[in-house]
Amino acid sequence: MPKTELIFLKDIERISNSVVTVGTFDGVHLGHKALIETVVRKAKERNARSVVISFDPHPRDIINPGSAGIKQLTTIQERREILEEIGIDVLLIIPFTRDFSLLSSEEFVKKIVFERVGVSEFVIGYDHHFGKDRTGTIETVENLGKELGFDAFVVSKREMGTVTVSSTTIRRELSENGAVEHASNLLGRKYLLNGIVIHGDKRGREIGFPTANLKPEHPNKVIPKNGVYAVKVRVEESWYGGMMNIGHRPTFDKIELRLEVNIFDFDKDIYGQTIQVRFLKRLRDEIKFSGIDELVAQLARDKENALREL
């Protein structure tokens, strides 16, 4: 499979003959997929390059600077990997700054989509708005297409599917409910987290359940609600079953949030490595146990339950 090229706006040389769509596409969920698959199909018909234009950071972080910041379902690199599976040729990332947010929809299409990306066809969702104050519409794209000489293609509500999916809903399902199965259904794949293995206090090893302590690769990544989860873990190119605890380890009176994964049938030294965790099912809430024996007995039950999900 050809790799999706990741390009930042400052590095781009003019692309010619491209089929383009524009959006944040955080999560690249099922609601996005029909739009992106249309871009791939249209590009093949034209023998053109398929291009997704996306933004970083999330536009709302800049437009509403007083907010706590939007947690991301997908990092830029994760977005690239998902788009590669769909068949996109280029992911163009535009740094979303205060100055950029003031660019009108017409200026955006003319200066970037047309002059820099060489659009021959602009694919837009039936309800999409873009540009300063979200004034850019289907009509904007169609009118500019007539003026500049590119086609506009609207993906209808029917083509985008009957189930309304939003990145906001998925974030809430994960962070507030820990509903990783529902979130995965909306995404069209398992929710994943990449993290670097760091040193912990080795409590898990002492009680027979050694864990890899993870530091998320991206500080703004959505972390599922505290609790225990059945997971699959990728270490280098191999996959393993496991169970993950997200929480404050109240049995040991710990305060800071920890992400710890017990990888089944695994005993390698992986400190400093980046591993990937895919969430399969939420097993239970975080619990404070009366002592170590009660904790160990529960962990044994958790492992049995996790193994059933693999």
Image (cartoon, rainbow, N blue to C red):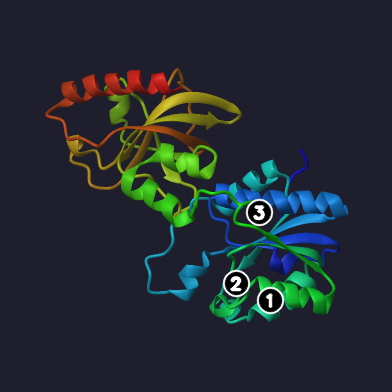
Q: Residues within 10 Å of mark 2 (few under 14, many from 20)?
A: some
Quadrant in which the N terminus appears: top right
User: Does residue 104 sit above or below 300 in this rendering?
Assistant: below
Q: Mark 3 points at which residue?
A: 35
Q: In which quarter of the image is residue 67?
A: bottom left
Which residue does the image show at 66% across and 47% down from the upper left?
A: 83
Query: Which disc, if any, is residue 16?
Result: none
Q: What element carries label 2?
A: loop
Mark 1 to mark 3 CA distance (whole Å)? 18 Å
Q: Name the residue under label 1.
A: 140
Residue kind at label 3, given as amino acid type: Leu
**What is the x, y in percent for residue 213?**
39, 37
Which residue does the image show at 33% across and 42% down from the upper left?
A: 258
**What is the x, y in percent for residue 39?**
73, 54
**What is the x, y in percent for residue 171?**
42, 52
Q: Which of 132 and 262 is in front in this view?
A: 132
Which residue does the image show at 74% across and 70% down from the upper left?
A: 113
Which residue does the image show at 76% across and 77% down from the upper left?
A: 144
Residue 192 seen = no
User: Does residue 214 sit above or below 36 in this rendering?
Assistant: above
Q: What element carries label 3?
A: helix
Q: Quadrant of residue 55?
A: bottom right
Q: Name the residue under label 2.
A: 130
Mark 1 to mark 2 CA distance (whole Å)? 10 Å
**What is the x, y in percent for residue 35?**
65, 54
As drawn, the residue found furthest toward the left would be 290
Query: Reading the chain from its start, which is encountered first: label 1 or label 3?
Result: 3
